[in-house]
């Protein structure tokens, strides 16, 4: 059974004067434990699509099923709960919480979203910090570590709740090539170890090559699918 | 919850100067209110004590209609022996009453054999008067601190105006209730300091002398001043006395007596009420200060952390927890301000007591201000500040929780 199924998926942004079709009748299926990349120029609809899959936005028409749930009908509260259980996020700007240490940033979803017991929380945080190579920096604050290290922490935070799916919008855009590859390697390693599906969008052609399946988007339409 | 507190406190500490300034503003407001409450309360209590303990008593009992015509001191509205007995019986039934003093009040002419002027006098039993008005003795600035038969205590201003001193002989002439005039020589036994309020400039004679001047066959009492053991029970004792005495009816079938608390008899009560109203408005100002300053900080905090709010919303933080985070920030600011303000306020009140500040009120000089504050007032003010801080944070917190994660993440 597919993890994500999109049928006739469209998203239109309309203002009084302007109507922009950000996504047009997309049809695709994504299998569990896959490593997927969406590529395309700016304005092609990558971020919009990731927002829909991440239950941050709703489609204008069509259906989108994530892990057996039709997410197009979720309200704010149920969508938040769904994200908290099933989806991890990695952001282009890392978006770590500056007042929390590395350890606390990784533990934030367990603490504030899933209410995980202390011992279990500690075990999962340390395991993931070890996996991304940030265990030694666990007591540092985000402004005391480099960009690459921040993104590794963000990967650990996205995975700490054992989500079925991790969405990463331009996760390497703010990193140099070496660091970008390192982050992608960590994501792949986590995918292999945990069976998590990773979907990321990128402009970087070299990084794109790391994906198992590459979807190309242009003007809101899927134009290509490469393995 | 503890973790939300920890995050809230760290967020506050992120902008140390702003947090400190806001908490200081709240603390200064709390200090100001506590000091105002303690000083005004001290002034009010002292003046009330001065007025009731010097002359007025806590409660007064008269024959019905007496207070309405008290300026003319009508002898026709005095209580006869039977009526007085009934009042005495009612008083004796209430254990909360510490003392009472029956008085004959009358107006007369005061002559030093050279000049004559009018005077208002109270005929009292000295020992009963001192018990009912304990500050009475302290008002005697010259002469003996009691009233003997044949002696008069002359008010200070009258003594100065008529140029009489302790030991001089004066004559009191008064009209009795039948309209005939009588006079009696008195030796000036003492000079009496004036006090604020009705009766504060009256002279005093022994009650037997008053009865003699007024040619009373039987003692007819004008008023009975009552002192309570606990001033806090004023209204309950007043209610009981009034209840008991209202069953006593006159020939017209109406209540024979009237009972008044000091509040109805002294104009200072209006000043006291004004102080209460000012205190209320000072509290309102504090609420406004807290509301505006905390709301301002919280609105700014939400605006500065839009991307952060977007992040935590995106990773699934329930809207209720986002609300709680900001409410706890507001709560912590208010709590910190209230605690610091409370401690500083108590310190300032302590310093005011050590400094022994005196003031003059009317003709009374050198009254010592001794401000005090009770724990209940500190707690009430602190709780008001904390509640207002949380209320001030409600709107920004709600706004944060309702933010669209996509818009918030895009915010620059």
Image: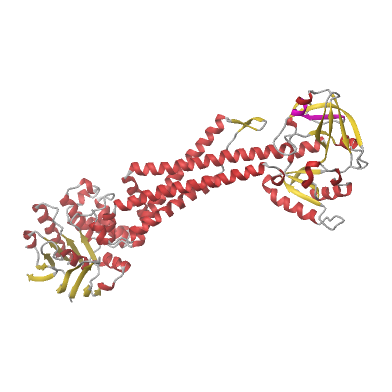
Q: Position of residue B368 (x, y in %)?
A: 62, 32
Asked if residue A224 is positioned above or below residue B359 in the image, the reply reads: below
User: Quarter of the image holding residue A60?
Assistant: bottom left
Q: Position of residue B21 (x, y in %)?
A: 38, 41
The residue shown at (29%, 60%) is B313
Residue B98 relative to residue B25: left or right: right
Q: Position of residue A141 (x, y in %)?
A: 24, 48
In this view, the residue farthest toward the right is B217
Asked if residue B14 is positioned above or below residue B166 in the image, the reply reads: below
Q: Is residue B340 visible?
A: no
Residue A227 relative to residue B101: left or right: left
Q: Quadrant of the N terminus of chain B?
A: bottom left
User: Quarter of the image holding residue B228?
Assistant: top right
The residue shown at (74%, 41%) is B57
In reply to whether residue A64 is colored magenta, the answer given is no
Q: Position of residue B13 (x, y in %)?
A: 33, 45
Q: Is residue B56 visible?
A: yes
Q: Which residues are magenta?
A: B150-159
The residue shown at (25%, 70%) is A58
Asked if residue A175 is positioned above or below residue B206 in the image, the reply reads: below
Residue B202 or A68: which is nearer the viewer?
Answer: B202
The residue shown at (45%, 52%) is B388
Residue A136 or A168: which is nearer the viewer?
Answer: A168
């Amino acid at each position: 059974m597919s993890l994500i199924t999109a049928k006739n998926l469209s998203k239109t942004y309309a203002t009084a004067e302007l109507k922009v079709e950000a996504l047009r009748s997309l049809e695709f299926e994504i299998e569990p434990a896959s490593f997927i990349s969406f590529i395309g120029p700016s304005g092609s609809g990558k971020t919009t699509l990731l927002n829909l899959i991440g239950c941050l936005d709703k489609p204008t028409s069509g259906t989108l099923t994530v892990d057996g749930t039709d997410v197009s009908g979720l309200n704010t509260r149920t969508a938040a709960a769904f994200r908290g259980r099933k989806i991890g996020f990695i952001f282009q700007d890392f978006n770590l919480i500056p007042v929390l240490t590395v350890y606390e940033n990784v533990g934030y979803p367990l603490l504030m979203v899933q209410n995980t017991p202390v011992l279990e929380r500690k075990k999962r945080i340390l395991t993931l910090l070890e996996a991304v190579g940030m265990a030694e920096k666990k007591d540092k604050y985000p402004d005391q570590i480099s960009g690459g290290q921040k993104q590794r922490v963000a990967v650990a935070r996205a995975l700490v709740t054992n989500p079925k799916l991790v969405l990463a919008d331009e996760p390497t855009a703010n990193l140099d090539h070496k660091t970008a590859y390192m982050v992608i390697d960590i994501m792949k390693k986590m995918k292999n170890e945990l069976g998590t599906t990773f979907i990321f969008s990128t402009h970087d052609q070299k990084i794109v090559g790391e994906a198992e399946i590459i979807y190309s988007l242009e003007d809101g339409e899927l134009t290509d699918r490469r393995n | 919850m503890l973790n939300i507190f920890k995050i809230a406190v760290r967020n506050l500490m992120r902008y140390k100067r702003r947090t400190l300034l806001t908490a200081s503003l709240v603390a200064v407001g709390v200090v100001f209110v506590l000091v105002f409450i303690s000083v005004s309360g001290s002034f009010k209590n002292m003046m009330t004590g001065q007025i009731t303990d010097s002359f007025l008593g806590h409660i007064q009992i008269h024959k019905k209609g007496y207070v309405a015509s008290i300026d003319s001191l009508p002898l026709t509205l005095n209580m006869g022996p039977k009526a007085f007995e009934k009042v005495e019986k009612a008083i004796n039934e209430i254990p909360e009453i510490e003392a009472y003093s029956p008085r004959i009040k009358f107006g007369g002419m005061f002559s030093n054999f050279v000049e004559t002027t009018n005077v208002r006098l109270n005929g009292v039993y000295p020992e009963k008067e001192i018990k009912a008005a304990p500050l009475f003795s302290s008002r005697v600035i010259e002469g003996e601190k009691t009233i003997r038969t044949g002696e008069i205590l002359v008010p200070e201003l009258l003594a100065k105006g008529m140029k009489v001193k302790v030991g001089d002989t004066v004559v009191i002439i008064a009209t009795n209730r039948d309209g005939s005039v009588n006079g009696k020589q008195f030796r000036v036994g003492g000079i009496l300091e004036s006090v604020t309020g009705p009766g504060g400039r009256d002279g005093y004679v022994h009650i037997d002398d008053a009865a003699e001047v007024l040619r009373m066959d039987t003692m007819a009492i004008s008023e009975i001043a009552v002192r309570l053991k606990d001033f806090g029970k004023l209204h309950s004792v007043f209610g009981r006395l009034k209840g008991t005495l209202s069953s006593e009816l006159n020939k017209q079938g109406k209540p024979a007596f009237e009972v008044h608390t000091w509040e109805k008899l002294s104009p200072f009560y209006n000043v006291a009420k004004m102080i209460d109203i000012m205190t209320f408005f000072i509290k309102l100002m504090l609420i406004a200060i807290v509301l505006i300053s905390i709301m301002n900080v919280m609105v700014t905090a939400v605006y500065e952390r839009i991307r952060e709010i977007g992040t935590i919303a995106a990773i699934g933080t329930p809207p209720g927890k986002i609300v709680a985070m900001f409410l706890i920030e507001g709560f912590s600011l208010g709590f910190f301000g209230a605690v610091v303000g409370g401690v500083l306020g108590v310190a300032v009140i302590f310093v005011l007591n050590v400094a022994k500040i005196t003031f003059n009120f009317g003709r009374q000089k050198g009254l010592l201000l001794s401000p005090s504050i009770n724990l209940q007032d500190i707690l009430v003010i602190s709780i008001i500040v904390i509640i207002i801080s949380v209320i001030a944070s409600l709107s920004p917190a709600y706004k944060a929780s309702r933010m669209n994660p996509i818009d918030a993440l895009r915010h620059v």
